[in-house]
Amino acid sequence: MGVAALKQKPKLKTYHATMLVTRAEQWCVEAESADEARQLLQAGQGYRCQLGDCVHVEVDEVGA
């Protein structure tokens, strides 16, 4: 047996985390004007066109 075969890998544990993730998403809505579109989007209308990039991640708590 070679030396590499004798080395044991460390046991890994699974950790869970509570994280705050902020993304810049692109949403779409059909409207007659930009003002109407803004109102519709603020009211929860429309749909996500593109997921976007993650702009901020904050790890709040880590536990086993």
Image (cartoon, grey):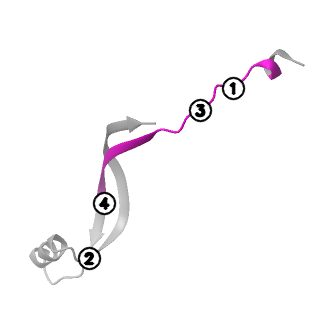
Q: Residue at x 38, y 36 (%)?
A: 62
Amino acid found under the numbered disc labelled 2: Gly
Up/down of 33 relative to 55, above or below: below
Amino acid found under the numbered disc labelled 1: Lys
Q: Quadrant of residue 29?
A: bottom left
State if disc 2 and disc 1 touch (CB < 8 Å): no
Which mark is nearer the camera, 1 or 2?
A: 1
Answer with mark 3 or mark 2, whichever residue precedes in sequence.
3
Q: Determine the CA span between mark 3 and mark 2.
A: 43 Å
**Residues packed near mark 4 inside 10 Å, few (<14), some (14 to 19) or many (20 plus):** few
* 16 inside magenta stretch: yes
Answer with mark 1 or mark 4, whichever residue precedes in sequence.
1
Q: Which residue is mark 3?
A: 12
The residue at the far top in this view is 3
Up/down of 3 relative to 42, above or below: above
Where's residue 30, x and y in %?
Answer: 23, 81
Q: Residue at x 30, y 60 (%)?
A: 25
Answer with mark 4 or mark 2, whichever residue precedes in sequence.
4
Circle on res. 46? 2
Q: Which residue is mark 4?
A: 25
Where's residue 19, x and y in %?
Answer: 34, 44
Q: Which residue is mark 1?
A: 9
Up/down of 35 relative to 8, above or below: below
Q: In the image shown, does 47 or 14 lie closer to the viewer?
A: 14
Q: Determine the CA span between mark 1 and mark 2.
A: 50 Å
Where's residue 32, x and y in %?
Answer: 15, 84
Which mark is nearer the camera, 3 or 4?
A: 3
Q: Determine the CA span between mark 4 and mark 2.
A: 12 Å
What secondary structure is found at the residue carrying circle 2? loop
State if disc 4 and disc 1 touch (CB < 8 Å): no
Q: Residue at x 15, y 70 (%)?
A: 42
